[in-house]
Every structure is written in C-alpha cells, then in structure tokens.
Image (spheres, grey):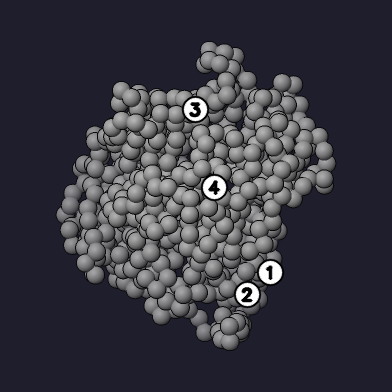
Amino acid sequence: MLNNFVCLFILIAALGTTLWSCTQTSETENKVGMYQKKDLKAPVASKIPKELTMHGDTRRDDYYWLNNRENPEVIAYLEAENAYTKQMTSHLEDLQDNLFEEIKGRIKQQDQSVPYKYNGYYYLTRFEEGKEYPIHSRKKENLDAPEEIMLNVNELAQGYDFYSIGGRNISPNNKILAYAEDTLSRRIFTIRFKNLETGALLEDVIPNTGGGAVWANDNQTVFYATKEDATLRQYKIFRHQIGTPVSQDVEVFHEKDNTFNCFVYKTKSEKYIVIATSQTLSQEYQVLEADKPTEKFKMIQPRERNLEYSIDHFGDRFYIKTNLNAKNFRLMSTPETATTKENWMEVIPHRDDVLLEGFDIFKDYMVLSERKNGITQLRVRPWSGEEHYISFEEEAYVAGTSINPDFDSEVLRFTYTSLTIPFSTYDYNMRTKSRDLLKREEVVGGYNPEDYESERVYVTARDGVKVPMSIVYKKSFQKDGAQPLLLYGYGSYGASMDPYFSSSRLSLLDRGFAFAIAHIRGGEELGRAWYENGKLLNKKNTFTDFIDCADHLVQNNYTNPDKLFAMGGSAGGLLMGAVANMRPDLWKGIIAAVPFVDVVTTMLDETIPLTTLSTMNGGIQMIRLITTI
C-alpha cells in the first residue's frame, strides 16, 4: 500500500515540488525528436485526434496513440517523462539512497516462516542473508529432522531478469513437487515437476498456466488452468498424466463466457477436486472425486445472475457461503447427493450488521471470519457447545485465519497485525482459549510500538453516512494543524483496505508525518451495502467520502491543505484523478500509482486483461457517471 518508494521520496522532501500537475497544449506534434531536447522541460503528450464509434456513439480520444507500447513515439515520450522526473528530483538523490538503505536496514535478511505440518511433513520458507529469493524446504515428522530443500529459488532465478515462483503442490505420496515459474512478469506460469526423492526434474513441462497444479489422489494426475493469449483470462481446465506429452492433455472444461474466469482447487477434505468459475456477481462450482480423476465433474449449483457462493467439504456435506437472500452472506450446508440451492440448509443466518467473509472447518469446530464496523473478527463455533469470539485489545486491527490443513486439530493458527503491531502469527487452542505467539515480524534496528499511536475515527460524510478512518502517527505528533499527513484510499471492487503494519511506513512517521486510511464506500469494510453504495451510479460516493475524510483531518487540526497529501493506486488512481479535479485546493501533492483514469477507452477495449470481467459487471454505467463529474 505504502511503498511507492516511501511515497516518492518522503513526498519530495515535504515539499519543494508539487507531485500532480496538469499541463495542456494546443499543438499537435508527433516527432520523436521533440522529446529529446537537452534543456528538459515538462513533457507534453501530443494530441492526435482519433474517432472511436461504439454503441451508436462517436467520441474523440486525443491520446489513443499512447495505447501502442510498440510505437517508438510512445517509448520516446515515456523516456522523456522519466528523464524529466530524474531531472526534477536530482537534488533528492542522496535522500533516495538514504531511504533505500534505511528501509532495507529494517528488513531481517536471514528469516524463516513459521513451519506448518501437512501430511507428515513440516513445511517452511526461509531467506539467507544477502540473497534475494526464498528457499522452500521441509522436515519429516518433526522440526529436529534433517532439512530437505525442495526449491532454492536463488539458484533457479540465475540468468533471468525476472523470476517468480507461483503455486507449489506436493503429490499425496509426498514424492513429487509441482511448481510454477514466471520469467516474464506477466503471471503466465510454466508448471514443472521435481522428484523429491532423487532431486531430478521430470520431463513434464506445462506452459501458459495460471500457476496452480492440483493433484488427484492417484499421485499421477494433475489438473491446471490455461490462459488466453491477449486477455490472460483463465478459461480452460486440463487434465495431465505424469509422463505423457502435454499435447495429449485432456480438456475437461472450457469457459466460453469471456466475463468469467475459471480455476481449480482441492477441498480441505481432499475428497474433491473443484472447478470454479467466477465473475463479480456470479459463481459456479463443479466437483469430481479425487479418487476418480478420469470421470466427469458434477455441477453443485448452475450459475445465476447475482447469485454468489463458494464451497468447501466436510464429512458427507458441502458447506456453502452465499448471498442467496442474504446481502452480507450466510452459511448453508447441503448433502453430497443433493447440491442445488433448493436443498441448502441454513447453518449461520444473515445479519444486517455483520459481513460473513469466510469459514474454516475442523472436526470439532467451525471458525468464521466476520467483519463488523469495518473490523475483522474470528468467531469460534463448536459443533456442540458454546461459541466465542477471539478477543483483541486494539481498536483497529487485522486478524485472519492462516494455514490450517488438519481437520483433527483443536488449534487454530491465525495472524494479527495493526497500524502499530508488526505481522504476528499465533496458535490458538479453541478449547482452552489460550494462545501462543509463534512469531512477530522483527523490525531490525529496534522498534517500540509504544512510541506510536493509532486512532479509529468516524467521519460524517455530506449525506450523513459515517465513514471509518484509521490514523497512525508518532506520539510526538502535534495536532496543531501544521503537520504533514498522507491520506490513502482505494474504494473499489469490494476490496477492504485494512489497518496493517508497514515497516517502510516508519520512514514517514519518524519524519513527522501522520498516515491515514480512508475506508470509503466502494470497499466492503462495512458490509456488502458499503460496496454497492460506492459503485455504478453510486460511484461518486467513493470520491466525496475521500474528500470529506480529508476535510475532517484539516478541520480537526491533524494537518492543513499545504501539508496534506493523497495516494491511491490502480482503481485508487482513478480516485486520485477524481479528487484532484473535484478539490484541487485541498492537496499539496497527489501520488496516483498506475492510475486507472482512461476509463472509457479502457472499459471498451476487450483485448485488455480484466476488461471483460469488469464490463459485464456494470462498467458502462460507471463510465456514464465518471464522464459527468
């Protein structure tokens, strides 16, 4: 959320240079040489009119030419922008170097994840000092056993400008590792297979996948998803037999609706392999017994517009989280033999003030992940007996279940963080209610959470709605209206922006900044209605909520417009574009990270990844609103 190189060099050293500028020109120039002058001035993109006609409407886009990344003029313009940025920030080069070393210095270079046990082995990921990539390993039966290195990514990455490991999946007999690698930075993964007994790579290589390989119970069959070339949409599921050519793989599912994305996974019970197809407003699931990988998948509930659901399996029943007659979702169950919605039976009812986000099933317990008043909660519900919530002391925090592969355990592993507490991993005994802190992310060089303070405030928006806002600062921060503050927001796709810890954020806080997160409509912090009241024809609420939060900060002397900065990325970059135009007087600077501001052209271009998935879900209505603001 924060890095963007610690908010563009501590907001251009707070601030000799304004970050957002809007420069226009009436000239139309398209020569590469115009961007290569020695006495650099702010580059101005040429206007080359292009008429685009769709749905009976013709519009003019002066900057359509910038869509072509292969165009030498586009490359020249981008290089000019980079050169201008370098020139304008040249006086900050020492600060850049210092910040880089400062941030890097807080990261523990020799580190290790908390091991978890699965199918007879403890699995862990560790980093060695001075090395960039992780080492994935395991130990048999106990943590004192010899370490078996499965993947040393430092070795695998040699010779590549970019290298990333995707999914890692072990065969049920623990002998073969399927892993995915991306060497292009486009999330197009190649699946490879490694014999963990001999260390040898198998000849099987599967290109152009989503990164996951799901094993059937025969230790020989895997299922995987492939991607469309242009959009990168996952649209086909294949079955592969180890030792056979990929050309012989069997297509078991083809998602022909380009507004849906598909993927494959295995239930926690390991009884079923599941094909899921999903878009924002609708999902569909099919299952296959993992012991019978060559048989046909069986439909759980056919897709319906506005019917959302997700599934897992336990015993002889499927458990289903759904919005069926439940805006904030409820939990249902259904027999394996009768899975369509008319057979669903309620387990956890719908609540107007609580969003059901997920569930984890154990032999004797069910753990519900819920959100109330914007804060995550963990609810432990025995199959028989009295339920309880896991208690936390802070007002604003993030808690969530971690890796819990064992049905038979009475211990829940969960994670916790807040604006002042680093990422922490706990084991919680659901019977005794005792908890053990297994690991807290170390901030190298020393960090005392008592030196910092966080707040949770509620801002009255212009329509009377209460908008949550989380704020953190060093305790020496004075609310005299003279201090700098960075306000972050997103407010799209129902994604909740939670108050989590960031060690890089300390570079701001220790220099006198406050940092605030506006939990504006368009996210899902206050339930499904919070999302729906910030999208489509209600999208303007996202922008005005953010502005109202900024006004609250000024009116309550946290900062002033000459020291107030805003930041958002991607869809949050759209937010930045809107608030910059609606209230240019309110900000000293704005960081728009990869901003999604070319809304009309982008949403109407089906060749762009993710566009079709968004357009079906009301993007055109959003376009009509944005163009009126």
Where, quadrant-wise, is the C terminus in this rendering?
bottom left
Circle 1 crowding by C-alpha within 10 Å: few under 14, some 14–19, many from 20: few
Tell me where residue 303 appears, x and y as whole percent: 55, 59
Q: Is residue 82 shown to the viewer in this render?
A: no
| Mark 4 in CB contact with mark 1 (< 8 angstroms) | no
The residue wearing badge 4 is 338
Q: Earlier in the sequence, mark 3 or mark 1?
A: 1
Tell me where residue 567 appears, x and y as whole percent: 39, 58
| CA gap, disc 2 and disc 4 | 55 Å
The residue wearing badge 3 is 406
Q: How many marks?
A: 4
- Give the secondary structure at mark 1: loop
Looking at numbered disc 3 in the image, what kind of residue is underneath it? Asp
- Residue that appears at 24% across and 49% down: 456
Disc number lying in front (4 or 3): 4
Looking at numbered disc 2 in the image, what kind of residue is underneath it? Trp
User: Residue 220 appears in which quarter of the rendering?
Assistant: top right
The residue wearing badge 1 is 71
| Mark 1 in CB contact with mark 2 (< 8 angstroms) | yes
Q: Is residue 618 above or below residue 103?
A: below
Circle 4 crowding by C-alpha within 10 Å: few under 14, some 14–19, many from 20: some
